[in-house]
């Protein structure tokens, strides 16, 4: 993997208050993983909401990046968050989006879904979504769930890259959803491939396989148990077997996670 696969960033959030954790994470991430340029984007149907403490916080972040000689630009746009952010990211060739994640609950969760998840589906960039309750400035434990999908081991390569930069430990979590024998074989093959990559990397890691029908809940409980700092997923992943109203693994991770989620765009889509 190249020394810096994410040279240009986009920092964004749907709601004004979501900028606070997104800014904090971007400032921390930048200490170890410096971009050449960063755009700060506020896009909303009511631009008047971007005032006071939020505007000041964004200006502080802009100043911190500028002090590191990183090219910084900020943009304020009116419109739909997911569509507007995706268009902006594509037109400006952003390789990484750091996004303040929207917490969606109740009836709206099933009717409209999450704008954060919509953004991940629309854009061609990898996305790190940061929840509003995020307060940590560490990246010591990274969880990499492995399933039977063909792209899943791409997370291992990125996880190794991040672990080397942040001196973190990788936690490889095999997800056995009790499906067909073919899927079980694919999972076994993917875990063996992940193990080979990790042995060659020389980083510290842990392997565990868990069974269950709801792989999202299994993953998030595991993250809570080990007090993880980041969980990875592919932007395209196999569906959560629990049912259509639960949504995909990716969507449920965004909706339920209490720690930052790194949605990695498959190489075939870049």
Image (cartoon, grey):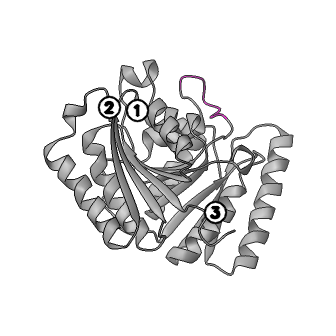
Q: Which residue corresponds to the image point at 56% horizontal and 69% vertical from the top-left?
A: 162
Q: Is residue 134 visible?
A: no
Q: Quadrant of residue 260?
A: bottom left
Which residue matches tag 3?
158
In this orientation, which residue lies closer to the viewer: 85 or 172?
A: 85
Residue 55, position in %: x, y? 20, 48
Check disc 1 and report the residue beneath it: 81
Q: Which residues are magenta?
A: 239-245
Furthest residue in direction bottom, as rendered: 202
Question: Which percent across, then down, holds residue 225?
Answer: 46, 59
Spatial CA distance of label 2 from label 1 is: 6 Å
Q: Are marks 3 and 2 in contact (CB under 8 Å)?
A: no
Percent x, y of residue 91? 54, 41
Q: Is residue 54 magenta?
A: no
Q: Give the side of residue 200 with respect to residue 165, left or right.
A: right
Mark 2 lies on a secondary structure that is strand
Say few, some or many: other residues with alpha carbon within 10 Å of mark 2 (under 14 / 14 to 19 / 20 or more).
many
**Helix, strand or loop under label 3:** helix
Q: Which residue is mark 2?
A: 44
Q: Earlier in the sequence, mark 2 or mark 1?
A: 2
Helix, strand or loop: magenta stretch? loop
Residue at 44%, 38% in the rendered image: 255
Classify mark 1: residues with Cα within 10 Å, few (<14), some (14-19) or many (20+).
Answer: many
**C-alpha gap between disc 3 and disc 2:** 32 Å
In the rendered image, which quarter is residue 110 located in?
A: top left
Element marked by disc 1: helix
């Amino acid at each position: 993997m190249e020394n810096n696969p994410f040279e240009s960033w986009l920092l964004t959030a749907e709601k004004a208050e979501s900028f606070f954790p997104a800014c904090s994470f971007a400032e921390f991430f930048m200490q170890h993983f410096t971009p050449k340029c960063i755009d700060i984007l506020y896009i909303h149907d009511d631009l008047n909401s971007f005032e006071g403490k939020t505007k000041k916080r964004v200006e502080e972040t802009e100043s911190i990046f500028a002090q590191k000689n990183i090219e910084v630009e900020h943009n304020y746009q009116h419109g739909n968050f997911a569509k507007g952010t995706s268009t902006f990211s594509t037109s400006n060739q952003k390789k990484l989006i750091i996004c303040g994640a929207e917490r969606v609950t109740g009836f709206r969760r099933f009717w409209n879904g999450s704008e954060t998840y919509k953004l991940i589906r629309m854009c061609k960039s990898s996305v790190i979504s940061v929840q509003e309750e995020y307060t940590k400035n560490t990246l010591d434990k990274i969880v990499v769930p492995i399933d039977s999908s063909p792209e899943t081991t791409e997370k291992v390569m990125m996880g190794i890259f991040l672990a080397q930069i942040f001196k973190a430990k990788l936690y490889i979590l095999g997800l056995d959803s009790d499906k067909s024998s073919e899927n079980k074989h694919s999972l076994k093959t993917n875990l063996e491939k992940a193990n080979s990559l990790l042995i060659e990397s020389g980083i510290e890691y842990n392997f565990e396989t868990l069974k269950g029908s709801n792989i999202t809940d299994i993953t998030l409980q595991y993250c809570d148990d080990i007090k993880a700092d980041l969980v990875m997923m592919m932007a395209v992943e196999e569906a959560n077997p629990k049912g259509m109203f639960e949504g995909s693994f990716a969507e449920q991770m965004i909706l339920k996670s209490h720690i930052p989620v790194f949605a990695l765009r498959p190489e075939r889509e870049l």
